[in-house]
Amino acid sequence: MIKAALSVLLVLVAVSSSFGKYTPKTGKRVPQTLSRGWGDQLIWAQTYEEALYWSRSRNKPLMVIFHLEDCPHSQALKKVFSEDNKIQKTLDEDFIVLNLVYETTDKHLSPDGQYVPRIIFVDPSMTVRADINGRYSNRMYAYEPSDINLLLNNMAKAKKLLKSEL
Amino acid sequence: MIKAALSVLLVLVAVSSSFGKYTPKTGKRVPQTLSRGWGDQLIWAQTYEEALYWSRSRNKPLMVIFHLEDCPHSQALKKVFSEDNKIQKTLDEDFIVLNLVYETTDKHLSPDGQYVPRIIFVDPSMTVRADINGRYSNRMYAYEPSDINLLLNNMAKAKKLLKSEL
């Protein structure tokens, strides 16, 4: 009898707590992630300032990905990028990562214009690595899904920090 | 027999795809959310620039929450804040929301210093509402869990846009 009462109580608590949660009129939403699909296992910086701070303090290069949720080129690159183990492992261990769906006020991050997808590397010395680019002369920092090995090579370049070239 | 072969195939596919996913050495992580616990059902801006743009274009006031993941005062406020239906509903319908674990370069967002938790309202005219504050004279934009009704009143103030006061 006590067990039954407890069960009823538990059910009531469960029902009331689910009633208590705010649900938008349009229905329950999936929480937005900071990864935005580029790698749920990576630790993403939230802002460019935060990313620069981490990059300097941990002496790791920064990768900034500019993309848009509803851009098919961004989506295609994101799929290959997020499923590539080597990219994900290298980023997790050796890079600071930031993905943005909005341009920053810093023009150094758009050396040849604001387009997506666009991947820019920044050295811990806070120098934008404009020298590390993809294969398209009109959009130097764009990558296609087939460029994933070029991207890996570019990550290896970014890992050679500028101060070690002095 | 074909069914059995298919099952084996399915199992193999399942095993290989879970093998394929990158897992950090320290174990699988929970994806970071943009809400960071302040309301998984809300649409959070990613940067201050993005939030300002949304605020202007939708003519909605902006709420900026500065907090830190490991600050007990932030955590306590976050719990009450995220579980308060009225706050969540009002924010979802009438506000642009941004939560930051890092300071921006804009000093208008820290009228009396950089501390957490701190809640600043910004009018769609891009004016920081320094006039909308909490109850503590030494940290004017701090709120405690017991201040949640004051916060709701302040949200009502922020909804009266500056241009309508002209």
Image (cartoon, coloured by chain):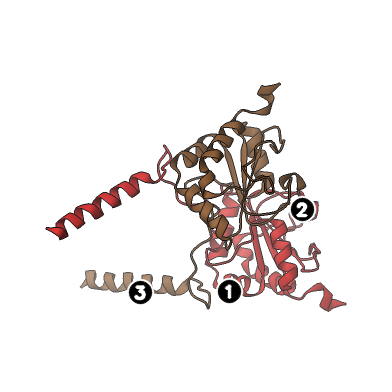
Chain colours: A brown, B red
Q: Are marks 1 and 2 on the same chain?
A: yes
Give amino acid for label 3: Leu
- Chain to which mark 2 belongs: B
Tags 1 and 2 in contact by the CB under 8 Å rule? Answer: no
- Total of numbered circles in the picture? 3
Query: Can residue B55 be seen in this snapshot?
Result: yes
Per the model, the C-alpha gap separating discs 1 and 2 is: 27 Å
- Chain to which mark 1 belongs: B
Per the model, the C-alpha gap separating discs 3 and 1 is: 24 Å
Q: Residue tagged by mark 2? A: B110
Disc 2 secondary structure class = loop
Q: Are marks 3 and 1 on the same chain?
A: no
In percent of width and height, residue A160 lies at 61, 28
Q: State the residue in front, A136 or A153.
A: A136
Give amino acid for label 2: Ser
Which image quarter holds the N terminus of chain B?
bottom left
Give amino acid for label 1: Lys
Q: Residue tagged by mark 3? A: A12
Disc 1 secondary structure class = helix
Decide: is B32 above or below A10.
above
- Label 2: how many Cα within 10 Å (few below 14, some 14–19, many 20+): some
Residue A3's image quarter?
bottom left
Per the model, the C-alpha gap separating discs 3 and 2 is: 45 Å
Q: Is residue B154 left or right of residue B41?
A: right
Which image quarter holds the C terminus of chain B?
bottom right
Q: Is residue B164 left or right of residue A28?
A: right
- Residue ranking furthest to the right: B166
Q: Nearer the viewer, mark 3 or mark 1?
A: 1
Q: Residue tagged by mark 1? A: B89
- Chain to which mark 3 belongs: A
Residue B121's image quarter?
bottom right
In percent of width and height, residue A64 lies at 63, 45
